[in-house]
Amino acid sequence: NQASEPTVQSPVPEYSCQRSTPLKHHNSRFCEAMELLQDYAEMREGDDNYMRALAWRRASCVLKSLKFPLTNIDQLKGAKDVGKHVEKVLQSILDHGTSDEVEKVRNDPWYKKMKIFTKVFGAGTKTAQEWIEKGWTTVDEVRQNYTKGDWRLRFGLAFHEELMELVTRLEADNFTKFIKHQCETILPGISVELCGGFKRGKTHGHDIDLLFTHQSTGKEVGFLPRLLSVLESKNLILCGKWNRGTYTEEAMYSDSKRTKNNQLDHFEKWIGIIKFPKKWRKSISEEEFFSDENVSADLNSYEDSEPAKKKLKTNELSPEDIAAQSRSWIARRVDLIIAPYDQYFYALVGWTGSKQFNRDIRTYAKRTHNYAMTSHGLYDLTKRKSLPAKSEKEIFDILGVPYFPPEERNC
Ligand code: CTP
Ligand code: MN
Ligand code: MN
Ligand code: MN
């Protein structure tokens, strides 16, 4: 009967960016298991664990791109990234429905705590580890005992429960519509694109990623501070940080300068939390949407400061106090990114993701062409010149990768 079972096309394209990876696929129970092992490895320190995490993810991505449910391990013959260890876990799930290795991690007290703590906005593995070492086991315990931390952590802790509640597609669409409407006054011609998981077809997400550009390059300069002023004047900003763009083409040719301070790119951006009116969580009429229509903001008042800090000083309310108030809004994580038009399509690919798709297409670009790929562009390291693109399709064409729409980049 083995002969009648489907097998992978042979050979399986090596990089996930060369394969169609839909959101809904046939092997979620295997992928869930492998991504748990990825997650666990990512939480632990060291290069070995980093490599291990990537290996689990790559294997998971192979399974995600299969056009059939795995029923026999031999179906994976010819697939890259499926080594002995992966086979062992998959075989165990095929035989018993579970894998001891996976279940051991799932029930590991350290893993469970790390899982809870790293979900807090602003908390990475280092902070989570620090909390575990204090003996804390719940976010509530952290909240009661932890007084340090930057604005991210303070708001992340105070608003943790509602930030954990996933953003729906409807909420994301409503917010995008609202921002587009504001843009008509602030800077006609600016384009607004909902990116991230929603662009890839997800119905829920942990935040809203909006990418802005203007077709006449240069017009986008100064736009974001003005948008933030408007949002501030409408009392829609809970906290956030505006970062100036730091891009130079020169830096793209240097391995060490391509990304700095763990940032994935050099765009001007705002990362923060919006006070999301509860009425925006359901379908609403245009009228109701734009009823409180008074953009009276001083469009130049937004300064290079952390509004969170500014706010805390002026109204003397702690994040906890604000969270405890009776209010007509809920907290929503929002990323606003500005891309100059000549970098736009690279920014679009980068901010659409998935993260693993970006990793793979960048590795592919480097290994096969000696190109450095970033969210700013594609840089030929041999000839030391950049390769501009006027569409997403053109980027794939330059690289010689088949074009897949965002819905098929769910690696
Ligand atoms: N990204 C990036 N630079 C950052 C942060 C994110 O290029 N500083 C990219 C990520 O690699 C990802 C996309 O932007 O491809 C969106 O990131 P994020 O919102 O973290 O993830 P999503 O895929 O949108 O998932 P979710 O729905 O949970 O938000
Ligand atoms: Mn985190
Ligand atoms: Mn997102
Ligand atoms: Mn994001």
Image: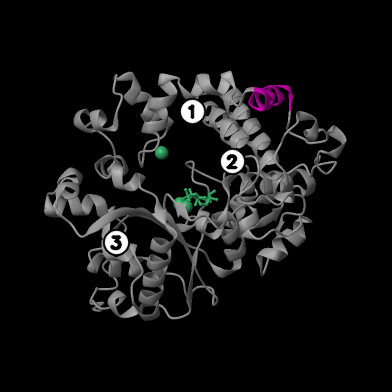
- Whether residue 85 is in magenta: the answer is yes
Please report the residue visible at 31 percent of the width from the left and 74 percent of the height from the top.
289
Secondary structure category for the residue under label 1: helix
Residue 331: image location, x then y, percent = 29, 53
Q: Are marks 2 and 3 in contact (CB under 8 Å)?
A: no
Q: Which mark is residue 303?
A: 3
Residue 359: image location, x then y, percent = 63, 44
**What residue type is disc 1 on?**
Met
Residue range corresponding to the magenta coloring: 83-95
Please report the residue visible at 18 percent of the width from the left and 57 percent of the height from the top.
327
Crowd band around label 2 with a 10 angstrom C-alpha radius: few (<14), some (14–19), many (20+): few
**What residue type is disc 2 on?**
Ser
Crowd band around label 3 with a 10 angstrom C-alpha radius: few (<14), some (14–19), many (20+): few
**What residue type is disc 3 on?**
Glu
The CA span between labels 3 and 1 is 36 Å
The residue tagged 2 is 256
- Whether residue 259 is in magenta: the answer is no
Q: Which mark is residue 43?
A: 1
